[in-house]
Image (tube, helix red, strand yellow):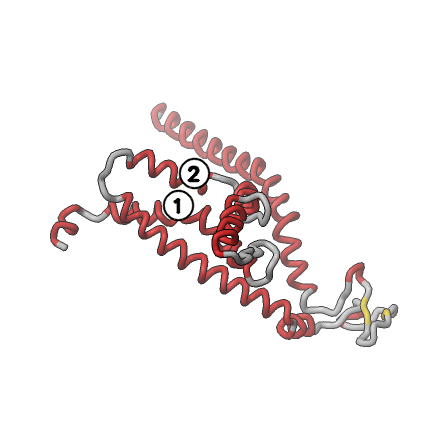
């Protein structure tokens, strides 16, 4: 009988302890959840909801001619109407078209360049040679930089006056007797290419690391059979 009572008390204390732990977990997590809801989830849902209305900044609703509508009309008397005009204007906006084109160019050109160069480097680094580990570390250094540092480094690399690239262009101009000056950072055609080159310079090591890991995971027998 005493054994049964002891077992019952032990089981009860275990359940109480588990319930206490569960409550404490919720207590400690609740501030983080509240901050996440207040700073991320709620603004996201609010922005999504207002995107389907004609409400303006400050809660003022304007008519089609720009005149401010003061009376509480519209959806449920709240002073605004449900509409898809925002999305219609967005789809017709030339700035959206330009943004989509630039994004597609950045993704296709950047990923293709990073994969091609990264694959070549992975093939080289997968071969045994003296100092291979040191070379791997050197190749990975750009990936360890923050995006801001990489952007400033790229800006200095492509500067039109003080960069080594600018000096190289001046040397070519003197050699060929003609002006060679590519506006890498200021021309609408060359600037996207420059951004792709800078981004690829930073993330080619990451692509190389992924491909190299895949190559080294292949058994040696497969290479010998091939």
Label 2, secondary structure: give it.
helix
- Looking at the figure, which quarter contains the N terminus? top left
Depicted 184 relative to depicted 164: above or below: below
Depicted 163 relative to depicted 93: above or below: above
Residue extending farthest top: 2
Give the quarter of the image for residue 34: top right
Residue 82 vs residue 61: left or right? left
Determine which residue is flagged by label 1: 205
Q: Residue at x 47, y 31 (%)?
A: 17
Mark 2: few, some, or many residues within 10 Å (few <14, many ≥20)?
A: few
Q: Position of residue 77 (x, y in %)?
A: 80, 70
Is the C-beta separation of discs 1 and 2 under 8 Å? yes
Q: Position of residue 199 (x, y in %)?
A: 49, 51
Residue extending farthest right: 70
Q: Which mark is residue 21?
A: none
Along the line of sight, which residue is nearer the eye, 224 or 79? 224
Depicted 87 relative to depicted 147: above or below: below
Mark 1: few, some, or many residues within 10 Å (few <14, many ≥20)?
A: many
Residue 156 visible in the picture: yes
Determine which residue is flagged by label 2: 141
**Mark 1 / mark 2, whichever is N-terminal:** 2
Label 1, secondary structure: give it.
helix
Mark 1 to mark 2 CA distance (whole Å): 8 Å
Q: Residue at x 58, y 49 (%)?
A: 160
Q: Residue at x 28, y 34 (%)?
A: 131
Give the quarter of the image for residue 134: top left
Along the line of sight, which residue is nearer the eye, 1 or 110? 110
Residue 73 vs residue 121: left or right? right
């Amino acid at each position: 009988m005493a054994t049964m009572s002891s077992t019952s008390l032990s089981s009860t204390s275990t359940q109480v302890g588990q319930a206490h732990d569960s409550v404490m977990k919720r207590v400690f997590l609740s501030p983080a959840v509240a901050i996440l809801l207040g700073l991320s989830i709620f603004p996201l849902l609010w922005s999504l909801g207002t995107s389907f209305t004609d409400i303006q900044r400050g809660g003022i609703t304007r008519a089609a001619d720009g005149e401010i509508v003061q009376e509480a009309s519209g959806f449920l008397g709240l002073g605004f109407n449900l509409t898809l005009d925002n999305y219609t204007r967005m789809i017709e906006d030339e700035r959206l078209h330009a943004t989509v084109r630039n994004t597609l160019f950045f993704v296709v050109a950047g990923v293709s360049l990073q994969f091609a160069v990264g694959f070549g480097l992975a093939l080289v680094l997968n071969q045994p040679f003296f100092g291979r580990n040191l070379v791997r570390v050197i190749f990975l250094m750009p990936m360890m930089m923050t995006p801001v540092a990489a952007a400033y480094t790229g800006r200095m690399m492509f500067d039109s006056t003080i960069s080594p690239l600018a000096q190289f262009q001046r040397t070519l101009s003197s050699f060929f007797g003609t002006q060679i000056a590519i506006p890498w950072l200021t021309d609408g055609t060359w600037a996207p290419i420059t951004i792709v080159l800078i981004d690829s310079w930073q993330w080619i090591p990451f692509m190389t690391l992924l491909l190299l890991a895949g190559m080294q995971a292949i058994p040696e027998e497969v290479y010998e059979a091939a």
